[in-house]
């Protein structure tokens, strides 16, 4: 019997219009849903300057795109960073580096291609209790709201593009 795909919609673009953090629906709030999920709906924060390239080539890791933000944050050059929550610091960071307007790219990605953010991994390496990969990913997504995707996220995985105010942008893929 074939298993049924389950999609966990972690990031809700409607939350971009909500001012109160407590009213937001985004995030990984259910461990049960996390464990059942084969796919996740997550967000990537970027600049409108990069949109044309993203729609043509997909979301590229820095090792392929040649782009790098110089801000002393640890980063994996072979991964694309994704978020389950709205964090304006990601938009500010990319606008400062590339200019343009802040935009949010919604994607659907396979769970088995996601990894925990290295900031959570380094935090966990200071503890005496090693966690399994799936537990690390859950903690990364539920506590930090972030994870990474190894490799290129194809343009066909893009669900939509949104302004920082939550308005869906009309883009031709």
Image (cartoon, grey):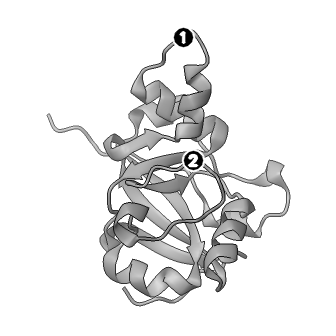
CA distance for labels 1 and 2: 23 Å
Q: Quadrant of the N terminus?
A: top left
Relative vertical location of residue 1 with respect to residue 158 in this rendering, above or below: above
Q: In this orientation, does residue 43 appear?
A: yes
Numbered marks: total: 2
Q: Nearer the viewer, mark 1 or mark 2?
A: 2
Question: Looking at the image, which is closer to me, 62 or 9?
Answer: 62
Q: Residue at x 42, y 40 (%)?
A: 115
Q: Quadrant of residue 133?
A: top left
**Mark drawn on residue 112:** none
Q: Quadrant of residue 86?
A: bottom right
Residue highlighted by disc 1: 129
Question: Looking at the image, which is closer to me, 74 or 14?
Answer: 74
The earlier-in-sequence mark between 1 and 2 is 2
Q: Secondary structure at mark 1?
A: loop
Q: Residue at x 48, y 36 (%)?
A: 34
Instruction: Using a 10 Å C-alpha cutoff, classify the residue at mark 1 as few (fewer than 14 neighbours), some (14 to 19) or many (20 or more).
Output: few
Q: Residue 104: x and y, percent?
A: 58, 71
Q: Secondary structure at mark 2?
A: loop
Question: Looking at the image, which is closer to me, 32 or 68?
Answer: 68
Q: Residue 127: x and y, percent?
A: 60, 15
Q: Residue 40: x and y, percent?
A: 44, 50
The reply, left or right, for residue 160 in relation to residue 19 is left
Relative vertical location of residue 21 with respect to residue 104 in this rendering, above or below: above
Residue highlighted by disc 2: 74
């Amino acid at each position: 019997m074939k298993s049924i795909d389950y999609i966990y919609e972690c990031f809700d673009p409607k939350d971009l219009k909500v001012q109160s953090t407590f009213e937001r629906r985004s995030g990984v709030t259910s461990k049960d849903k996390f464990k059942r999920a084969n796919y996740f709906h997550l967000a990537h924060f970027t600049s409108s300057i990069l949109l044309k390239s993203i729609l043509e080539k997909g979301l590229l890791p820095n090792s392929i795109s040649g782009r790098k933000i110089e801000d002393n944050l640890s980063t994996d050059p072979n991964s694309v960073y994704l978020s389950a929550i709205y964090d304006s610091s990601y938009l500010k960071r990319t606008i400062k580096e590339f200019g343009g307007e802040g935009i949010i790219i919604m994607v659907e990605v396979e769970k088995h291609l996601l990894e925990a953010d290295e900031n959570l991994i380094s935090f966990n390496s200071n503890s005496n209790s090693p966690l399994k990969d799936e537990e690390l990913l859950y903690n990364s997504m539920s506590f930090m709201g972030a994870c990474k995707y190894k490799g290129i996220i194809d343009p066909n995985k893009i669900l939509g593009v949104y302004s920082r105010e939550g308005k869906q942008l009309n883009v031709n893929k």
